């Protein structure tokens, strides 16, 4: 049972880390999308843009080419996708909360050496 609990905790950490990384990527792509006029294909000679905006728009164009074939599927299944993502994040947070509560109960019951492997005080 300990192995399953550790696996669930590690899986929830992985889900939360992936969600944080995905939020950063989405923010970067949104910035690039808002700066579309800075892309060399769309910009004029008098448009002055920094290299960060140009790089962000290049990334938006690249990701757009990769994701474009799946656009209809994502539009059709948008509500299901949002629900699944939200439930996954809630489940990962709930696993973390339950793990913290279990650790606090174990420490309160066994004292300072609750996390030492093989340690069980005499009741």
Image: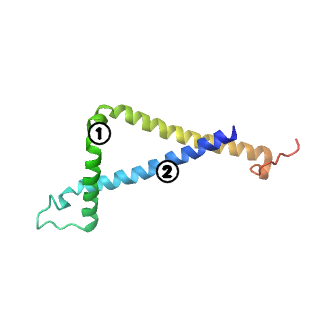
Task: Name the disc covering residue 1, or none.
Answer: none
**Residue at point 29% right, 45% down?**
67
Q: Is residue 89 left or right of residue 28?
A: right
Q: Does dot 1 land on a helix, a strand or a loop?
A: helix
Quadrant placement of the C terminus: top right
Q: Most extreme residue toward the right, as rendered?
A: 122
Q: Quadrant of residue 77?
A: top left
Q: Residues within 10 Å of mark 1 (few under 14, many from 20)?
A: few
Count the marks: 2
Q: Position of residue 50 (x, y in %)?
A: 24, 68
User: Badge 2 is on which residue?
Assistant: 17
Quadrant placement of the N terminus: top right
Q: Residues within 10 Å of mark 2 (few under 14, many from 20)?
A: few
Q: Position of residue 21 (x, y in %)?
A: 43, 52
Q: Nearer the viewer, mark 2 or mark 1?
A: 1
Asked if the residue under mark 1 is in contact with the one under mark 2, i.e. CB atoms within 8 Å, the reply is: no
Instruction: Answer above or below: position of 114 versus 80.
Output: below
Q: Is residue 118 left or right of residue 51?
A: right
Q: Is residue 36 left or right of residue 1?
A: left
**Residue at point 29% right, 31% down?**
76
Q: Does dot 2 land on a helix, a strand or a loop?
A: helix
Q: Position of residue 103 (x, y in %)?
A: 69, 45
Find the distance from the CA under tag 2 to the CA under tag 1.
25 Å
**Residue at point 11% right, 67% down?**
45
Q: Is residue 75 left or right of residue 123?
A: left
User: Badge 1 is on which residue?
Assistant: 70
- Sequence order check, earlier mark of 2 and 1: 2
Coloring applied to the structure: rainbow
Q: Position of residue 19 (x, y in %)?
A: 45, 47
Residue 112 or 17: which is nearer the viewer? 17
């Amino acid at each position: 049972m300990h192995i399953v609990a550790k696996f669930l905790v590690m899986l929830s950490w992985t889900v939360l880390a992936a969600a944080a990384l995905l939020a950063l990527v989405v923010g970067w792509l949104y910035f690039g999308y808002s700066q579309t006029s800075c892309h060399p294909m769309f910009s004029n000679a008098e448009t002055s843009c920094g290299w960060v905006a140009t790089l962000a728009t290049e990334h938006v164009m690249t990701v757009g080419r990769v994701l474009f074939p799946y656009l209809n599927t994502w539009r059709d299944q948008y509500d299901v996708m949002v629900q699944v993502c939200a439930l996954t994040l809630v489940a990962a947070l709930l696993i973390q909360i339950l793990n913290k509560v279990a650790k606090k109960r174990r420490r309160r019951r066994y004292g300072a050496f609750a996390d030492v492997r093989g340690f069980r005080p005499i009741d």
